[in-house]
Image (spheres, rainbow, N blue to C red):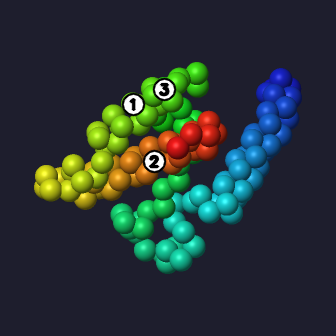
């Protein structure tokens, strides 16, 4: 019985610290506007599909384009053009595909564009 009480006395503070850490992390996450809803959409209704706020973690632009950091300008352009031709939203609009699929392709296309622009700024080419 004494061993159980000592074990509880040791574990209980650890559990409290863990839950307070999770609570603090969630509060900080929501205060940065990364929650499921933006502040104007949180009206108590069920989660709307179109207004669902998506956040993307900033990815390495070279990883987005699928090339290495030591790639030449020609290789970067080739990777960029291949991805643009693959994910361009105009390819999917006239094919009677789901709107969500077209929206995801548009988001991917924007991500590719932003990565290419960032690499252009870093490397100093146009």
Of the numbered discs 3 and 2, the one sitting upstream in the chain is 3
How crowded is the residue under tag 2: few (<14 C-alpha within 10 Å), some, or many (20+)? Answer: some
Q: Residue at x 62, y 63 (%)?
A: 33
Q: Secondary structure at mark 2?
A: helix
- Which x, y percent locates residue 87? 31, 44
Residue lying farthest to the front in this orientation: 126
Measure the C-alpha gap from mark 1 to mark 3.
Answer: 10 Å
Q: From this view, report whether residue 122 is shown above or below residue 35.
A: above
Asked if the residue at tag 3 contacts the one at tag 1, i.e. Cβ–Cβ closer than 8 Å, the answer is: no
Number of the front mark, 1 or 3: 1
For mark 3, what is the residue? Answer: 67
- Which x, y percent locates residue 121? 61, 44
Q: Closer to the camera, 66 or 6? A: 66
Q: Closer to the camera, 75 or 64? A: 75
Q: Closer to the camera, 101 or 28? A: 101
Q: Secondary structure at mark 3?
A: loop
For mark 2, what is the residue? Answer: 113
């Amino acid at each position: 019985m004494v061993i159980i009480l000592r074990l509880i006395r040791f574990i209980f503070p650890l559990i409290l610290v863990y839950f307070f850490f999770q609570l603090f992390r969630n509060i900080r996450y929501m205060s940065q506007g990364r929650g499921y809803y933006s502040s104007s959409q949180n009206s108590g209704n069920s989660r709307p599909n179109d207004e669902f706020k998506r956040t993307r973690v900033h990815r390495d632009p070279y990883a987005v384009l699928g090339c290495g950091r030591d790639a030449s300008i020609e290789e970067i352009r080739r990777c960029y053009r291949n991805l643009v031709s693959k994910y361009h939203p105009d390819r999917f609009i006239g094919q009677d595909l789901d709107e969500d699929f077209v929206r995801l392709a548009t988001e991917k296309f924007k991500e590719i564009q932003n990565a290419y622009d960032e690499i252009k700024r870093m490397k100093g080419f146009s």
